[in-house]
Amino acid sequence: MFNLFRPSSTKTLSRKTLKLKPSTTQAEYFNLAHTFSSALHNRVAQRVLECYAIAEKQLEQVFPRPEINFKLRGKSAGTAHLQQNQLRFNSTLLTENQDAFFEQVIPHEICHLLAHQLYGRVKPHGREWQALMVTLFKLHPSTTHSMNTQSVEGKQFSYRCDCGPVNLSVRRHNKVVRGETQYRCRRCKRELVANL
């Protein structure tokens, strides 16, 4: 993981750590140049900075820059970890859906961080988050993406009920095998049975 706006060994970035002059302004402090080894990841970092510049101009407030990494797996395009002030992105989906990431996913996740910093604990896709999406980035506040996730889907296990076949993820299948849980069909409410 590369920490874009924080050194990995500390929670906060100090002027001493960065060897900055005492005269360094807050704007210069927040816009320090950092690079990833991937040009695409560098473009994401630049887009994050652009989104923060838009937010700060409109809200007339300065926000701490988040840590960024590209180690998210599964079907999620991105996640915001509020307490850690961290953005995690799915590198595979980023590569396959660059336009959607730059236009929708990055602002979407940044709005989660901003909503938390402005309002504290609120619903993840509640009024506050929606207002930030519309006001700051002029985007429809969609809660999910519509990207093709076939390349990142894990192995599926076939189950059935009265309605027909149902696929379960490896995680859910393993919980059934270990006897930790049982899953029911959302329509007929019958217990799902593994296809042998």
Image (tube, helix red, strand yellow):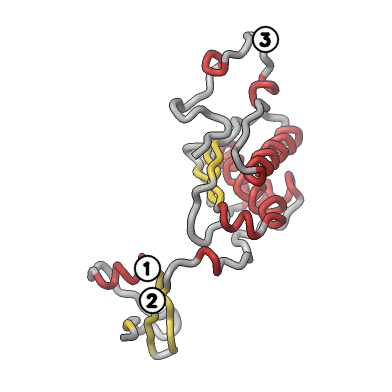
Name the mark on residue 170: 1
Q: Earlier in the sequence, mark 2 or mark 1?
A: 2
Asked if residue 87 is positioned above or below residue 124 in the image, the reply reads above
- Quadrant in which residue 163 is drawn: bottom left
Viewer-nearest of discs 3 and 2: 2
Q: Amino acid at mark 1?
A: Val
Q: Evaluate if marks 2 and 1 touch, with contact meaning CB atoms under 8 Å apart.
A: yes
Instruction: Classify mark 3: residues with Cα within 10 Å, few (<14), some (14-19) or many (20+).
Output: few
* Residue labelled with disc 2: 157
Q: Residue at x 56, y 18 (%)?
A: 18
Residue type (three-letter) at the residue carrying disc 3: Ser
What residue do we see at 68% from left, 16% from top?
A: 25
Tell whether 49 sits left or right of 159. Answer: right
Left or right? Give the position of 133 relative to 69. right
**Residue placed furthest toward the left:** 179
**CA gap, disc 3 to disc 1?**
55 Å
Mark 2 falls on what kind of element?
Answer: strand
Residue 148 pos. (x, y %)? 61, 67
Q: At 68% across and 27% down in the image, what residue appears? A: 31
Instruction: Name the amino acid, label 2.
Output: Phe
Q: Between disc 3 and disc 1, whose residue precedes?
A: 3
Marks 2 and 1 sit apart, C-alpha to C-alpha, by 7 Å
> Circle 3 is placed at which residue position?
23
Q: Circle 3 — which element? A: loop
**Rendering coords of residue 6 (x, y %):** 53, 29
From the viewer's side, name the closer residue of 44 and 28: 44
* Residue extending furthest toward the front: 37
Position of residue 187 in the picture relative to residue 92 (left or right): left
In which quadrant of the rendered view does residue 54 lie? top right
Q: Residues within 10 Å of mark 1 (few under 14, many from 20)?
A: few
Mark 3 near mark 2, Cβ–Cβ under 8 Å?
Answer: no
